[in-house]
Image (cartoon, rainbow, N blue to C red):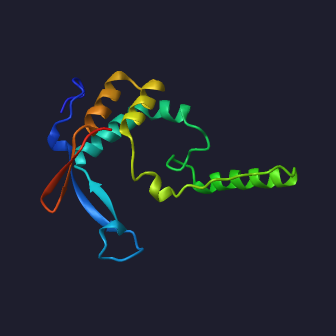
Amino acid sequence: MSFKYCYVPDLLKIGTLIPIFKNKGNIKDAINYRGITVTPTLSKIIEKILKLRENIKIIETQNPLQSGFTEDTTPLMCELITEEFERENKDLKRPTYIAMLDGKSAFDVVVHANLIRRLFQIGISDQSLLMIQNLYQMLLHVLNGMVTFRNLS
């Protein structure tokens, strides 16, 4: 592994896929399971180093309403803002439309190329950007000895 060359060996890209029951539906039906991939500890250390290097830029450009996974914040703050918005519009007799997203499903599919592009736009260092891109390219998921590939998409 080398931060200098922005390279992560394939061995650190192998994760063990663990099926977790969603607590709804038939326990024998595979569709009622969510796959959680446990990655090597060294990969997590690389992610932590990159986060420590670049998190300030991310926080500075983050929309204040998008704080669900931000340190020292809580989803209740977002709920409070939504409730106040709804009440104010009701008082002013303005029509209000609020769409809710199932947060559990929001991260089922992530287009990594879009995330990489956004990191580039906010000014993440070239070295960190290349490391992040390399870390998530050609991931291997192993379940019961079967290997599946997942390329950065």
Q: Quarter holding the C terminus?
A: top left
Identified at 69% across, 55% down, the residue is 80
Identified at 39% across, 45% down, the residue is 110
Question: Of residues 12 and 148, which is closer to you in this image?
Answer: 148
Furthest-left residue in view?
A: 145
Question: On the picture, is 128 further left or further right than 151?
Answer: right
127 above or below 33? Answer: above
Percent coordinates x, y for residue 16 in the rendering: 21, 56
Identified at 39% across, 41% down, the residue is 111
In the figure, residue 49 lies in which quadrant? top left
150 above or below 62? Answer: below
24 above or below 13? Answer: below
Question: On the picture, is 1 further left or further right than 58?
Answer: left
20 above or below 3? Answer: below
Percent coordinates x, y for residue 109 in the rendering: 39, 49
Q: Quarter holding the N terminus?
A: top left
Percent coordinates x, y for residue 68 in the rendering: 53, 50
Percent coordinates x, y for residue 2 in the rendering: 20, 29
Identified at 16% across, 36% down, the residue is 9
In the figure, residue 119 lies in which quadrant? top left
